[in-house]
Image (spheres, rainbow, N blue to C red):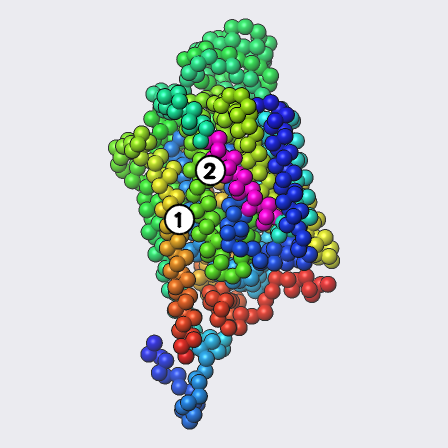
């Protein structure tokens, strides 16, 4: 695909996003419009919007990349992303909507009647939000560079500008329409090219996806190194190289001996057919049977890792700040449930597709194992398999879909983080709530962009998985115990949030900084949820039992509010999140 | 439901009057109101846990199953190996079915609760 087609696709997506936002902006005049669209969104629109917001770069690009490199075990990522919504539906959706809160800290304050609990929740929302925004911006950088060759910073900045325009012009109401539009864009952008590539694969006589032994180049292949990479060569191979290999300038035949080699940016390497593919150092792709079958990963304790990942994804979804804020836009608890059922349907349809890309990428884009940028498989595959104009159009379509994925998830996260920042941090200084929200939105974007540009590039789905682990170890226990157990006290909740959120965040940092290879430490730190989530639950329960006098005085009324249908005429208390603004203005 | 008999109120002298609405019992957090509210919460929680136990239980058993019976993972259906077929496709309609079942029954529990309050 030419750079101009890719650029056109990206700009069109950005433009359409802003336009849809402006159309939806008409009624966004009050604080309530900004945060929850004044609760006038129907379940179907809301479900599309939730799907649009939830399907991030990790789903659109990351899952296929992981399947390409690691095979069967990675199918748990999309399954977990979907099952997380089932857990959310059956345990949290309706009570949370009935609580009347706008944000997670609102819920903490309403249920526990404690400002300290509110502030602890605020800090965690910002932590998880930034952790989730980081890979979105990295993916945006990767996409823009892959399709147009522009520098790494262009993607994040472009996403930030569009998000800011959307968020600042209309808040939640305009965002709801934008997100709903983006779900359908993403589904089309992945489904249509998938049909074509499967047809082409069949016209080739459905070559087998798994080969015996390590992956090899099926035909002579020219690889351009766009970013300097260090690769691991397993057996001596003879290639043609032009550029810089191992720090030396070369032009002609080169023999690569087993071991590590560095390939500088701009190098062009021609591999003859049948040569075993060297793989990037930061990647240990599986081959043959190990790729095709589950639990064959080369890491220690694959069973523990799989279970811990499953736990994090199942129970982390409910603790993601941008997921919860969507539920407040339902008119009542029943609508919140129906919306969630529809979301499960929409996600299920979408997640059938990334696997197809990952599996076929194994045959048609094996050089990604060499460059290490397996996340690009969705972007490259349509252009690789379909020639001419049609190929260009399909490539433009997936690019547009990928861009929609960054835009929608970043918008949702920005709104949630901005809501918390503006209410709890900036709100004390800026009187006008709408202005405070706008200031919060800018702040919510600047920090993760800086991080994305400074930090090393990590696997998109990996970082997102870590955000899920932190959410599962902090907000999940607070929500479950808060909704279903009267005796949760503010002291218990704060202790659990600090211990669970703290331990899992430390594990995340440990993985990024230290990355132990051997023994139990590696899997324990890389997949912390299996131990940090039970610890958080235990701390919350034990501290709550030890501080029975700190039970919220209005807990019975809160329980009435959370669990009884709205149609029953009951006294649900007078707590209203908007009071925070009224008392000040 | 036997408690319903014990709450008689002063209305003995005026038997034709409507008794205290249950909603007020709940609002005032009387013993009776508590019983009604707790029973609502408990039946919702029971439903939720049952749905989760079945759906997530089956899902969570899969890795263990693949581990204990590795020969199963080699079976292929329509040219697709079993783990790929189950985790890549079959899981999604199953989750949707569980969600639909839950939503329907949760609404039924709430309807029963509303009917109960109205009947008095």
At a point 61% along the width and 48% down the height, the residue shown is A175
Residue sitting nearer the eye, A400 or A528? A400
SS for dot 2 = helix
Q: Which residue is mark 2?
A: A526
Q: Is residue A523 left or right of residue A435?
A: left
| Mark 1 nearby-residue class (10 Å; few <14, some 14–19, many ≥20) | many
Q: Which residue is mark 1?
A: B96
Q: Is residue A369 left or right of residue A179?
A: left
Residue sitting nearer the eye, A126 or A215? A215
**Residue A90 rendering spot, x and y as whole percentages:** 42, 55
**Residue A102 rendering spot, x and y as whole percentages:** 58, 57
At a point 48% along the width and 33% down the height, the residue shown is A192
**Considering the image in quadrants, where does the N terminus of chain A appear?**
top right
Q: Decide whether residue A21 is among the magenta residues.
A: no
Q: Identify the magenta region.
A: A175-194
- Chain identifier of the residue bearing label 1 in the image: B
Q: Is residue A122 above or below residue A63?
A: below
At a point 47% along the width and 66% down the height, the residue shown is A565
- Please tell me whether the stretch drawn in magenta is mainly helix, strand or loop: helix
Q: Point out the residue furthest to the top here.
A: A252
């Amino acid at each position: 695909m030419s750079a101009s087609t890719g650029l056109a696709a990206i700009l069109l997506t950005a433009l359409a996003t802003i336009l849809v936002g402006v159309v939806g902006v008409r009624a966004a005049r009050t604080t309530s419009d900004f945060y929850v669209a004044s609760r006038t969104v129907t379940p179907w629109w809301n479900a599309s919007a939730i799907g649009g917001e939830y399907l991030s770069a990790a789903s659109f690009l990351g899952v296929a990349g992981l399947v390409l490199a690691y095979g069967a075990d990675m199918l748990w990522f999309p399954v977990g992303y979907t099952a997380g919504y089932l857990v959310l539906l059956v345990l949290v959706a309706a009570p949370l909507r009935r609580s009347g809160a706008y944000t997670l800290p609102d819920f903490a304050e309403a249920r526990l009647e404690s400002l300290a609990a509110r502030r602890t929740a605020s800090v965690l929302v910002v932590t998880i939000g930034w952790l989730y925004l980081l890979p979105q911006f990295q993916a945006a950088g990767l996409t823009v560079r892959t399709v147009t060759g522009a520098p790494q910073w262009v993607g994040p900045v472009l996403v930030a500008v569009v998000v800011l325009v959307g968020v600042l012009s209309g808040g939640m109401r305009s965002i709801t329409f934008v997100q709903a539009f983006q779900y359908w864009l993403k589904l089309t952008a992945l489904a249509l090219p998938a049909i074509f590539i499967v047809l082409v694969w069949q016209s080739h006589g459905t070559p087998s996806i798994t080969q015996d032994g390590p992956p090899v180049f099926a035909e002579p292949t020219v690889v351009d190194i766009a970013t300097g990479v260090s690769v691991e060569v397993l057996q001596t191979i003879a290639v043609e190289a032009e550029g810089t290999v191992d720090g030396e300038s070369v032009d002609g035949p080169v023999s690569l001996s087993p071991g590590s080699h560095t390939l500088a940016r701009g190098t062009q390497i021609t591999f003859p057919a049948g040569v075993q593919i060297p793989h990037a150092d930061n990647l240990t792709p599986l081959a043959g049977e190990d790729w095709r079958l589950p639990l064959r990963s080369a890491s220690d304790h694959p069973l523990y890792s799989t279970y811990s990942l499953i736990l994090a994804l199942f129970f982390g979804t409910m603790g993601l700040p941008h997921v919860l804020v969507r539920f407040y836009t339902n008119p009542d608890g029943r609508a919140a449930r129906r919306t969630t059922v529809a979301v499960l349907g929409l996600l299920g349809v979408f997640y059938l597709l990334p696997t197809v890309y990952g599996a076929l990428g194994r045959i048609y884009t094996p050089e990604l194992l060499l460059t290490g940028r397996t996340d690009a498989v969705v972007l490259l595959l349509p252009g690789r398999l379909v020639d001419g104009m049609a190929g260009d159009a399909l490539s433009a379509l997936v690019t547009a879909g990928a861009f929609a994925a960054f835009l929608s998830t970043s918008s949702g996260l920005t709104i949630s983080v901005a809501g918390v920042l503006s209410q709890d941090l900036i709100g004390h200084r800026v009187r006008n709530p709408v202005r405070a929200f706008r200031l919060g939105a800018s702040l919510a974007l600047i920090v993760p962009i800086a991080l994305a540009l400074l930090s090393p590039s990590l696997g998109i789905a990996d970082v997102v998985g870590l955000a899920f682990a932190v959410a599962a170890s902090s907000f999940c226990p607070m929500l479950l115990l808060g909704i279903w157990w009267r005796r949760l006290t503010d002291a218990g909740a704060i202790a659990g949030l600090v211990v669970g959120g703290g331990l899992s965040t430390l594990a995340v940092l440990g993985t990024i900084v230290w990355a132990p290879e051997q023994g139990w430490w590696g899997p324990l730190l890389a997949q912390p949820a299996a131990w940090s989530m039970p610890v958080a639950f235990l701390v919350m329960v034990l501290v709550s039992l030890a501080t029975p006098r700190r039970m919220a005085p209005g807990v019975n009324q809160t329980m009435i509010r959370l669990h009884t249908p709205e149609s029953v005429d009951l006294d649900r208390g007078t707590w209203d999140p908007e009071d925070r603004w009224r008392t000040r203005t | 439901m036997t408690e319903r008999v014990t709450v008689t109120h002063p209305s003995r002298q005026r038997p034709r009057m409507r008794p205290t609405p249950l909603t007020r019992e709940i609002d005032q957090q009387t013993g009776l109101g508590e019983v009604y509210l707790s029973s609502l919460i408990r039946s919702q929680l029971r439903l939720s846990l049952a749905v989760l136990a079945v759906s997530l239980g089956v899902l969570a058993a899969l890795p263990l199953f693949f581990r204990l019976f590795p020969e199963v993972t080699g079976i292929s259906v329509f040219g697709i190996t079993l783990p790929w077929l189950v985790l890549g496709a079959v899981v999604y309609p199953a989750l949707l079915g569980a969600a639909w079942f839950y939503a329907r029954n949760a609404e039924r529990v709430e309807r029963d609760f509303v009917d109960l309050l109205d009947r008095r």
